[in-house]
Image (spheres, rainbow, N blue to C red):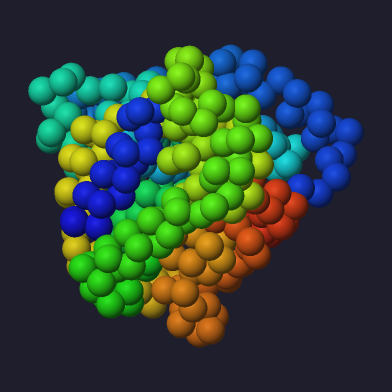
């Protein structure tokens, strides 16, 4: 799928160089997140024995499976967005096949497909003993959520999609049109004058040739990674990961396997489930979730648009994002 080639290319460019007041109980639950993640690890062999999926969990309550972006990324960047929810929701986190902690043999990377990841998610559902999954996806993870929903509609309870790609490429005017618009939006965000201000505020030399290795990494995060993903560049340090663990070859292989005619609307009509879409109004993937607006007006999805927020909306608007995510998750678990 060509649009994923573009997304992967942008990820390689950006990466390869590199809420509400919490209750006392939720504070206690969030202080030891690192320990929880380490203590709760287990491994799920894939059905073809080509990989072992690294699986862990954090929080308490009914399970919600998180699907990270990329493809080829890892799950760690989402942790801060989950913290306000940990007293009431248990998040199942895993690195998808081929990603950092769920690697495949080098000669298998080019063979990775979206269909394999759908099969892995179904295997995870069975291993968890869940008849239906509550899914929370971000970025490319929304594509995996939608693909799983199409393949196994009877095993999806609800979906929360943040930084969501369109429900069908045809809605966006076709792949070529969408690709061109996405590229233009990214370039515009990367040309913002605030980038120079953020570089200066970080104390970086005017001449990048004088950068130390640490400064070079800071410059890359401020100049390339942050502008596309957040609106307020003063918060660039909150963008964790920033591509350190991103595998571009994995992303390219899986991205190429995504069907160009993927469309969840027929599945949503035949097997309706609650869908919550959380989107920044300046998210380069789909600003304000415009491509979901018709489904929202028809009552098929619940749409939360974050003002002055981009692809990592929980950094730009932490309270609004936490409230929207809580709404979707509470409905997911039947609260």
Residue 152, horizontal then vertical, whole percent: 33, 55
Locate residue 24 relative to residue 303 in the image: left or right: right
Q: Residue at x 21, y 33 (%)?
A: 249
* Residue 153, horizontal then vertical, whole percent: 37, 60
58 relative to 276, above or below:
above
Residue situated furthest front in the rendering: 207
- Could you tell me if residue 31 is visible in this image? yes
**Apparent side of residue 55 relative to residue 113 in the rendered image (left or right):** right
The reply, left or right, for residue 255 in relation to residue 297 is: left
User: Is any atom of residue 165 visible in this view?
Assistant: no
Q: Quadrant of residue 306?
A: bottom right
Q: 192 or 269: nearer the eye? A: 192
Along the line of sight, which residue is nearer the eye, 207 or 219? Answer: 207
Looking at the picture, does residue 313 appear above or below residue 204? below
Q: Outermost residue toward the right?
A: 24
Q: Residue at x 46, y 28 (%)?
A: 207
Residue 2: image location, x then y, percent: 19, 56
Residue 9 on image: x %, y %:
26, 44
Q: Is residue 185 left or right of residue 289?
A: left
Q: Quadrant of the C terminus?
A: bottom right
The residue located at (37%, 49%) in the rendering is: 140
Q: Residue at x 38, y 66 (%)?
A: 166
- Residue 302 occupies which quadrant of the picture? bottom right
Q: How many callouts does the rendering have?
A: 0
The quadrant the N terminus occupies is bottom left
């Amino acid at each position: 799928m060509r649009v994923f080639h573009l997304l992967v290319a942008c990820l390689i460019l950006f990466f390869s160089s590199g809420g509400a007041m919490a209750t006392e109980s939720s504070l206690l639950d969030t202080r030891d997140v690192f320990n929880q993640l380490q203590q709760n690890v287990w491994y799920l062999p894939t059905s073809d024995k080509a990989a072992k999926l690294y699986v862990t969990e954090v929080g308490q309550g009914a399970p919600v499976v998180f699907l990270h972006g990329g493809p080829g990324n890892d799950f760690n960047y989402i942790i801060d967005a989950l913290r306000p929810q940990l007293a009431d929701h248990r998040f199942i986190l895993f690195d998808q096949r081929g990603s950092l902690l769920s690697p495949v043999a080098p000669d298998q990377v080019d063979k990775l497909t979206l269909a394999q990841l759908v099969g892995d998610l179904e295997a995870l559902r069975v291993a968890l003993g869940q008849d239906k999954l509550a899914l929370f996806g971000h970025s490319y993870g929304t594509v995996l959520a939608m693909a799983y929903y199409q393949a196994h509609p009877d095993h999806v309870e609800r979906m929360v999609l943040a930084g969501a790609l369109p429900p069908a490429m045809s809605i966006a005017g076709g792949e070529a049109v969408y690709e061109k618009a996405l590229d233009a939006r990214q370039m515009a965000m990367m040309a913002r004058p605030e980038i120079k201000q953020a570089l200066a505020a970080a104390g970086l030399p005017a001449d990048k040739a004088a950068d130390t290795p640490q400064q070079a990494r800071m410059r890359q995060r401020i100049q390339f990674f942050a502008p596309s993903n957040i609106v307020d560049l003063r918060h660039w340090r909150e963008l964790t990961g920033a591509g350190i663990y991103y595998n571009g070859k994995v992303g390219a292989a899986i991205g190429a396997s995504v069907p160009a005619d993927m469309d969840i609307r027929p599945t949503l009509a035949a097997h309706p489930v609650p869908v919550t879409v959380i989107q920044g109004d300046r998210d380069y993937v789909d600003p304000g979730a415009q491509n979901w607006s018709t489904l929202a007006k028809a009552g098929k999805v619940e749409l939360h648009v974050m003002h002055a927020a981009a692809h990592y909306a929980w950094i730009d608007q932490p309270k609004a994002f936490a409230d929207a995510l809580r709404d979707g998750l509470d409905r997911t678990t039947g609260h």
